[in-house]
Image (cartoon, rainbow, N blue to C red):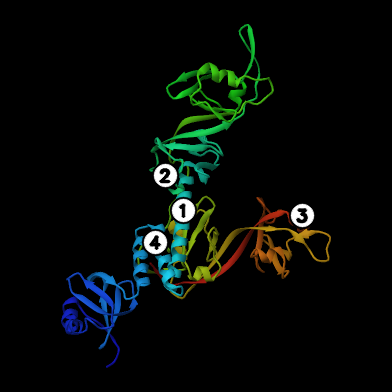
Amino acid sequence: MNMKIKKINAAKLCILLLPFFICSAGSLYADTIILKSGSILKGIIVKEYSDRVILRIPDGEVGIYKNLISKIVYLRPEQNLLELGNKCAKRGEFGEALVHYRKALRINRDFEEAKDAIARVREAKQSQKEISEERLRQSLGIIIKKEGNEIKVASVDARSPAFRAGIKHEDIIETIWDAHLKYEKLDKAIALLTGEKGASVSLTIKRQVSPIRRKIRWYQKEFVGIGISLSMKERGLTITNVSPGQPADKVGLKPGDRIVAIEGKSIRYTGLSEAIKKMAGQAGIPLDLTITRKVRIVRGGYKKIKADPSLVLPVVKEEEIAGIGVQIVLTSKGPKVVNVLYRSPAEKAGLKRGDLLVRIDEKPVRGLSSKESTKLLKGEVGSIVQTAIERDISLIRQKIPGKNFAGIGCTLSKGENGFEINGLLPDGAAKKAGIKKGDIIVRVEDKDITNKISFSQFVEEIRGPVGAELTLTIRRNLAIKRTKIRVQ
């Protein structure tokens, strides 16, 4: 009999296969399909598509649509673990998915599907993290990090809502809406901070300050201090007044701030008079204080961010799309790649997470909406999309053989839009860092050098001490073939 795949409905399937399944209950065929109708089918699943599975039986192969299937139990335990992992991944439970995939690999080290699934989920987790961080930054204007058991502010954008509320680099976020963050995961903190535009969020931040004691004249008296008034309130030692122009004012202390530590030591059970004694000292000597402050920030009114789901998303659903296999978010500098699908055309062409899209088919994309950029990336299956990307690359200057200076190990020429790489030394720093012939250097550190400096000036920027780090921004042209991509 020929092996053509038959596509039949549930009723016909049950009629055709029921005698076989009844007769072969004790056979070697152990993959089990339980239909929504209650029927149980046994055979070997040889292929799985987005909408159907192909079941091999003695008479050939039949296609069974997934909308008829209630559950599949596989012959191999590693396959069952893979399915459990896929279900977790579709719900966004990436940690649980990885547990199941790793168990599958422990059973079968050569199980390629589990290896691929682990790679996809890792990319999905990183992409999810980067998108969440970018949304937080565009909502409040901050980036946060996990340091030890605490959540810290890694950076604050100028003129952002957080900046206007007085949040500073290295502030510790103790609570969000009175939910304590110590020992909490970073993604939980990001989720609590991110919300609807125009809605407010309440934080308690902890900060260390070191005002320098000075002589202060108050009426007819003169004393050494930092220029604050204190009161012991229910929440603890609280600043009730800050004298303008005095040391406390200069380091940003405000009425309402609560002092929780003096010279690095907690004062939780310290009375007012004893705390004042601990703060005494000589003029010109810094006073190390740890304070907490309640801050309310109104989200939004800064920038907007939208992750475009029409390209390749992490493991959340099954579908076939035409594209190159990337996910982008819109940033102030243009579309940024936050995920590159495993084994996609984009990955094969060398596109990486963090790359900034500059041009798509010769059209500049900075200023375009996410929808417009996505439309440019899409096209007919098999067609080529020409892209230009910018990438930051860090490398270490090294001694150039036969020369008395340190550089990055490449030859250059001045072009219209920067300095083009013409050649690379085999063991040079540039080649080791992933720079390629034809790349164009457009920035050195944070300095834009396109058409702004001479060749000799540029060479001086590149050279430096042996072992010194150098950050370059390169522009690279990539031709990527569009294809159908299966997203799981």
* Circle nearer the viewer, 4 or 2: 4
Name the mark on residue 177: none
Q: Which residue is mark 3?
A: 464
Q: Position of residue 296 (x, y in %)?
A: 44, 33
Q: How much space separates mark 4 and mark 2, taking CA atoms?
A: 25 Å
* Circle nearer the viewer, 1 or 3: 1
What residue sits 46% from the left and 32% below the top? Answer: 295
- SS assignment at label 1: helix
Comes first in the chain, label 3 or label 4: 4
Residue reaching furthest to the bottom? 1
Give the answer, above or below, for where 278 lies relative to 202: above
Comes first in the chain, label 4 or label 2: 4
- Judging depth in this view, the residue of 354 and 125 nearest the camera is 125
Q: Which residue is mark 2?
A: 194
Q: How much space separates mark 1 and mark 3, taking CA atoms?
A: 36 Å
Q: Which residue is mark 1?
A: 129
Under mark 4, the amino acid is: Ala
